[in-house]
Amino acid sequence: MKTKLFVGNLSYNLDEAGVEELFAQSGKVVSVAIPTDRDTGRKRGFAFVEMGTEAEAEAAIRNLNGHNVDGRQLVVNPSKPKR
């Protein structure tokens, strides 16, 4: 497993700092990226979070997958490489 995670069903109210704060409970957060729509600039409802170690990434999955944030149930999985 790698240290980069895909976070789905993310609340549109969360920004990078909010996501980092949430994931920091499971370990060191290296980076957070929330993609936006090219045309509208709106957040797309998912993020990529890179954790410091594989153990911290596994802890984040255990702790946050299914966790309710802003009325939305997070989906946290290892990120798959772009095809």
Image (tube, helix red, strand yellow):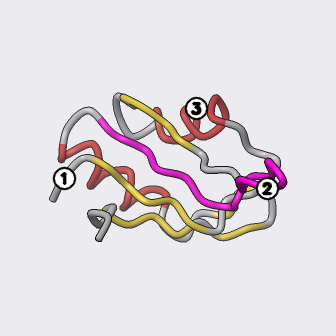
Amino acid tagged 3: Glu
Answer yes or no: do the residues labelled 2 and 3 have beta carbons within 8 Å? no
The residue lying at 73 percent from left, 68 percent from top is: 72
Question: What is the span of residues highlighted in magenta in the rendered image?
Answer: 37-51
Q: Distance between the residues labelled 1 and 3?
A: 21 Å
Q: Distance between the residues labelled 2 and 3?
A: 28 Å
Does 66 sit left or right of 82 as displayed?
right
Nearer-the-camera pick, 75 or 68: 75
Amino acid tagged 1: Lys
Q: What element carries label 1?
A: loop
Which disc, if any, is residue 21? 3
The residue lying at 65 percent from left, 68 percent from top is: 9
Q: Distance between the residues labelled 2 and 1?
A: 31 Å
- Percent coordinates x, y for residue 52 in the rendering: 26, 32
Amino acid tagged 2: Asp
> Which residue in the structure is indicated by mark 1?
2
The residue lying at 59 percent from left, 63 percent from top is: 67
N-term mark: 2 or 1: 1
Which secondary structure is most common in the magenta stretch?
loop
